[in-house]
Amino acid sequence: MKSLSIKNTAVSALYFIASMAILTGLWTLISIITKNEIPGPLSTWTIFKELASEPFYDRGPNDKGIGNQLFSSLSRVFSGFGLGSIIAIPMGLLMGSSKIGMRLLNPIVQILRPVSPLAWFPLGLLAFKAAEGATVFIIAITSLWPTLINTAFGVASIPQDHKNVGKAFGFSKWKYVVKIMLPYSIPHIITGLRLSIGVAWMVIVAGEMLSGGVGIGFFVWDSWNGLSLERILVAILIIGTVGLLLDKCFNALQTVFSWESK
């Protein structure tokens, strides 16, 4: 069993290396075709080493190391993601367990869900009087929908046999929620959270471009103003890598709570 696990890990690692080789090859080809107007991997790697040599320096409001920029963005992302989840999960439980709740709330969800984060930003500024609060607000309001929808779907798909067991044992509403509703819907909730954290991480870049200050989105915008495409590409790679790691963490959590893994 252990040897099989090692073999699967090695195969996954080889596929990942092959995938990165393809990406690097395409990147190099594009750089050659554009006559290095889009910097290639080598020049970008040089800039990355410079940024990584002192990632946490702080020389003022608009001059911080890439590490400070990244952790500032992650702080906003988890704040907005957490706030959105606190709203989404109870709403999803209500919509999934009640036909009245579904009929009342579903039209609101379908109207608000497609709205761009850029459209929410002015309202966030008006409500919180500060760019920091507005950024967290747009992350929360745009990332909560996948969690809400998946939670509602998970609760609505509870088999009737499970509900009958609760009735047979005379479960109170609270005991039904704790013993049947939540255990059955947790895999769906985690799937929603996995999708939501991806949305939150995408939205942070747009939010910080608008709000300025500090963060990986501001770093991209500041690099563009400084005409440093290498720094922009470094930021893109960092954004993608962090997004991959966040997805892997939630995928592992999803596997733990998956009914198929029991």
Image (spheres, rainbow, N blue to C red):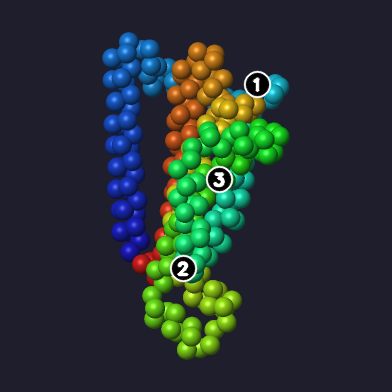
Q: Is residue 168 left or right of residue 17?
A: right
Sequence-first disc among 1 and 3: 1
Total numbered circles: 3
Camera sees residue 123: yes
Q: In which quarter of the image is residue 14?
A: top left
* Mark carried by residue 182: none
Describe the element under mark 2 as helix, strand or loop.
helix
Report the amino acid beneath label 1. Asp
Q: Residues within 10 Å of mark 2 (few under 14, many from 20)?
A: few
Q: Nearer the viewer, residue 179 or 138?
A: 138
Residue 141 is marked as 3
| Left or right of residue 60, residue 163 in this image | left
Tell me, yes or no, whether the two marked residues, 1 and 3, touch with CB atoms within 8 Å.
no
Quadrant of the rendering where the N terminus is positioned: bottom left
**Residue 173 image offset from top left, x and y in percent:** 57, 78
The quarter in which the C terminus is drawn is bottom left
Q: Which of marks 2 and 3 is nearer the N terminus?
A: 2
Mark nearer the N terminus (2 vs 1): 1
Q: Name the residue under label 2.
A: 99
Q: Residue at x 71, y 22 (%)?
A: 60
Cα distance, mark 2 to mark 1? 53 Å
Front disc: 2 or 3? 2
Between 3 and 200, the one nearer to me in the picture: 200
In the rendered image, which residue does mark 1 sit on? 63
SS class, disc 1: loop
Q: Is mark 3 on a helix, strand or loop?
A: helix
Q: Image height check: is 252 above or below 246?
A: below
Q: List x then y, in percent, for residue 39.
A: 40, 17
142 left or right of 244 in image: right
